[in-house]
Amino acid sequence: MLQKIIPNIILWAIVTGIVACSYAADYIEGEMTNRASFSISARYVAGTGVIVEWDYDPDNESFAGYEIYMTEDPDNEFADMIVVGARYNISSSYFQKVDNLQNASTTSFTHSSLPSSGIYFYRVGVVNWEERDYDGDGKKDKSPTSPNESLYESYTEIDAISGSAMVEIY
């Protein structure tokens, strides 16, 4: 009897260990990359472009703006991801400067400077100002008093990033 129970207990321990390791690895990876902090939707409307929508409240004093990213390869988080929308001209061939992306209350973006037909994946990044002494008074500030493109490019970081949304452009 004991000879049947022991292999089952060992098998149960191995399976439990593998599952636990998988969940632990996913949790650690998620914390390290801060992936998919919120969801988005995207749809193609002929004659208008791709409409990307989200529901996210940055709820902090360091908010610098939203950035919209596009790629053809969703399984590679860092390759070929281009910025297609932001508050300052970060530049790509499909980029659009959109002033309302600096407002925390913004919940949509229409991408009209589209690439050729195909399947694309969009993501939204929440960008924060780094805490530093922007005004020279010796105290760290949550954001600059007079933000500009140079400060934005030098002193911001991604705080959160959405999951991806697939769109077919035709």
Image (cartoon, grey):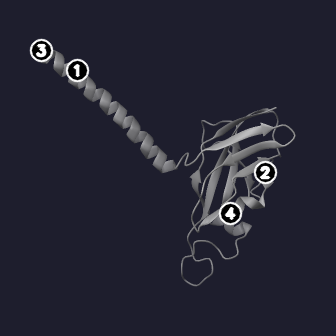
Callout 4: 10 Å neighbours few (<14), some, many (20+)? few
Q: Is residue 87 visible?
A: no
Determine whether the residue tagged by mark 2 lies in a helix, strand or loop.
Answer: loop
Determine whether the residue tagged by mark 4 lies in a helix, strand or loop.
Answer: helix
Q: Which of the two labelled residues, at mark 4 and mark 1, occupies the earlier sequence position?
A: 1
Q: What amino acid is labelled 4 in the image? A: Glu
Residue at x 63% of width, y 41% of height: 164
Q: Which of the two labelled residues, at mark 3 and mark 4, occupies the earlier sequence position?
A: 3
Mark sitting on residue 8: 1
Callout 3: 10 Å neighbours few (<14), some, many (20+)? few
- Please, which residue is most extreme toward the right here? 47
The residue pinned by badge 4 equals 153
Whole-Å distance between the Cαs marked 1 and 2?
59 Å
The residue pinned by badge 3 equals 1
Q: What amino acid is labelled 1 in the image? A: Asn
The part of the image, by quadrant, that contains residue 102 is bottom right
Closer to the observer: label 2 or label 3? Answer: 3
Q: Do the residues labelled 2 and 3 touch (CB within 8 Å)?
A: no
Q: Which of the two labelled residues, at mark 1 and mark 2, occupies the earlier sequence position?
A: 1
Closer to the observer: label 4 or label 1? Answer: 1
Q: What amino acid is labelled 3 in the image? A: Met
The part of the image, by quadrant, that contains residue 51 is top right
Question: Number of numbered discs present?
Answer: 4
Q: Is residue 98 left or right of residue 6?
A: right
Residue at x 60% of width, y 47% of height: 162
